[in-house]
Amino acid sequence: MLVSLDGEVGEELPLTTEPYERGHGTGDNPALPIATLRLDGERVEGSSLPDTGPPVELLPAQAPAESIVLDEGTIDGQLAFTINGATFPDVPPIMVPLGETRVLDVRNDAEMDHPFHLHGFFFQVLEADGVTVPESNRFNKDTIIVPMESSLKLVARFDEPGMWMYHCHILEHAELGMMGELRVEE
Ligand SMILES: [Cu+2]
């Protein structure tokens, strides 16, 4: 079950943001209203989630590695969120031959959490802060929070040609530079 709305017909349920400390005092923000849900009519039984997901094809843990360092700072007096010390579009593209697998060593040196998002491919988390993730906990993901001052080792197979983006999924951070290209070519 994803959401259960328990209440009487006519009852109003507020939907609010949930402040979360992702660095620099962001968790101090008050909860903000988003919408009010008004219960109207009879209860509808939706479908429930299965107990288990589809099987995950484990990607190899050994592959050439690419280093992606997330950080924050100032460039030309402006706040910047950087990848390997640069901001988009000056982040050198990661080049991957079509069909190859790469480990992405993502390190977050910033004092903020950054949700790493990859277009076009799923990745699996191999390690978190040097601790191996058990195979039973490996899932296909396209976004994962890289907590402040921590690192994740990800693996992905790049089997679609093209120019793909990876970026922080806090869009203000992507706008301020934390975005790069991954080129998959034959
Ligand atoms: Cu970010």
Image (spheres, rainbow, N blue to C red):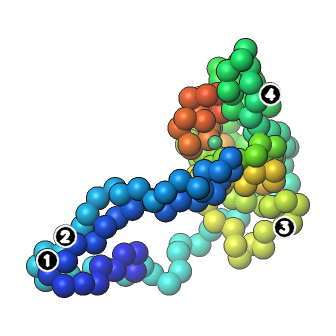
Residue in view at x 24 percent, y 67 percent: 37
Can see residue 141? no
**Spatial distance from mark 3 to mark 4, Cα to Cα?**
27 Å
Q: Residue 85's mark?
A: 4
**What amino acid type should be assigned to the residue bearing mark 2?**
Arg
Among numbered discs 2 and 1, the one appearing first in the sequence:
1
Residue labelled 1 has its Cβ within 8 Å of some atom of ligand 1? no
**Spatial distance from mark 3 to mark 1, Cα to Cα?**
50 Å
Asked if marks 2 and 1 touch (Cβ < 8 Å), the reply is: yes
Residue in view at x 22 percent, y 72 percent: 12
Q: Is residue 118 left or right of residue 41?
A: right
Among numbered discs 3 and 1, the one appearing first in the sequence:
1
Among numbered discs 2 and 3, the one appearing first in the sequence:
2
State which mark lies toward you, 2 or 4: 2
Front-most of residues 182 and 8: 8
State which mark lies toward you, 4 or 1: 1
**Spatial distance from mark 2 to mark 3, Cα to Cα?**
46 Å
Instruction: Provide the residue designation for mark 1.
Output: 10
Among numbered discs 4 and 1, the one appearing first in the sequence:
1
Instruction: Provide the residue designation for mark 2.
Output: 38
Q: Is residue 169 left or right of residue 145?
A: left
**Spatial distance from mark 2 to mark 4, Cα to Cα?**
48 Å
Q: Quadrant of residue 3?
A: bottom left
Front-most of residues 54 and 174: 174
- Crowding at dot 2, Cα within 10 Å, few <14 / some 14-19 / many 20+, comes out as some
